[in-house]
Amino acid sequence: MPQPLAPAELLARRPQEPILEAELPIVDPHHHLWDRRAAVASAPPTHGFEALLRLSPRYLLDELLADTGSGHRIVATVFVECRAMYRADGPAEMKPVGETEFVNGVAAMAASGLYGETLACAGIVGHADLRQGEAVAELLQAHIAAGNGRFRGIRHSGSHDEDKTVLGPLARMPAGLYGTKEFRAGFAQLERHGLSFDAWVLAPQLPEVIALAREFQGTTIVLDHVGTPLGIGRHAGTRDERFAVWQQHIRELAAASPNVHVKLGGLAMPFCGFDGFMTDESLSSERLADLWRPYIETCIEAFGAERCMFESNFPVDLGSCSYATLWNAFKRIAAGASADDKRALFAGTAARVYRLSIPALEAAASPAR
């Protein structure tokens, strides 16, 4: 792991760039909220993920709005589970509902209009252990009720690598989770409750998502973080040579089911091993676009713009760049896209997949009178 600068020094060195296409409406379909201050204070970082928590140990509505208000026009966001604010008591399997209760409160604050245009957490993706099988239905119903019309889906990470240093503190899941009988019995409940599924796996695990998509054609599946190519631990120095394998799997996944979509982002995470993570080498949006373009363009070519959505993955991706620089990088990658494709990539796909009603987008789509 790179030896990081002190958080204040690192953030102070981040370049300030002019905002590109500032009026382009954006739905950010993947961010988190958390308060990890106690965890950060209790232990020194031994992994890149733990190090980046020191940059943003508290990321609540104020911090989110500071990012969404940093120049780009973020009209709405989708919160994705991160084990935040679980209930402190009650049955263990129901504790994740606390996260939905918390996020719905944040969404209600943003919906008041007191904080500007951005509808923060207009959609909520929570967590459920789908290994509960059919019994998970009770938890899903509780999430839906707690979301007050905003709850959209479940993420149950399947990320796993035999080298525990790859995921560090996130190395929680067993190998082959998505293929187990218990998981699939729980997964079958999603379609019955009208919920989507966010899949987070690492690049070597993409065949697991392909198999899942082929079996469950009626469930909307969203692949997070372009499938997370790897460049650390036992994968250090092999990312480029494994690109062709990743690319083939992405094409197979796109063909597996029309209900599969992909989030374009997450490449600033430590797992990918790109330059600039937690170092004083603050990369420009031009440099980030060059690094990320092969992965993002492959996904757009395979899925089409109508099944792709740019994501911030903040504050996790803060380890490599600011929120404003990240969206500049995405806009550089999409610079040659048609107006229709840009609308899909930056807002339309996310709004459709997560079933969001966003006045700013609806007004833009209405014909002039």
Image (tube, rainbow, N blue to C red):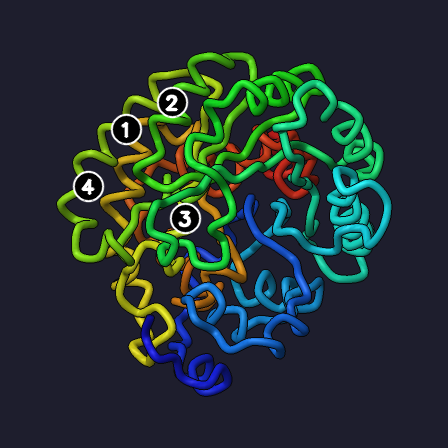
> Cα distance, mark 1 to mark 4?
10 Å
Horizontal side of residue 113 vs 256, given as left or right: right
Q: Which residue is mark 4?
A: 243
Horizontal side of residue 231 vs 179, given as left or right: left
In terms of secondary structure, where does tag 3 sit?
A: loop
| Mark toward the start of the polypeptide (1 vs 2) | 2
Residue at position x 39%, y 72% in the image: 17
Horizontal side of residue 150 vs 80, given as left or right: right
Q: Which residue is mark 2?
A: 210
**How crowded is the residue under tag 4: few (<14 C-alpha within 10 Å), some, or many (20+)?**
some
The amino acid on which the numbered mark 4 sits, given as a three-letter code, is: Phe
On the image, which quarter does residue 185 sit in? top right
In terms of secondary structure, where does tag 4 sit?
A: helix
> Residue 54 location, x and y as percent?
53, 75
| Mark toward the start of the polypeptide (3 vs 1) | 1
> Residue 320 location, x and y as percent?
39, 67
Q: Quadrant of the C terminus?
A: top right
Q: Residue furthest left?
A: 241
Whether residue 64 is visible here, answered yes or no, is yes
Q: Circles 3 and 2: CB distance less than 8 Å?
A: no
Q: Which residue is mark 3?
A: 265
Residue at position x 33%, y 17% in the image: 255
Q: Circles 1 and 4: CB distance less than 8 Å?
A: no
In terms of secondary structure, where does tag 1 sit?
A: helix
> Cα distance, mark 3 to mark 2?
20 Å
Q: Nearer the viewer, mark 3 or mark 1?
A: 1
> Residue 178 location, x and y as percent?
48, 27
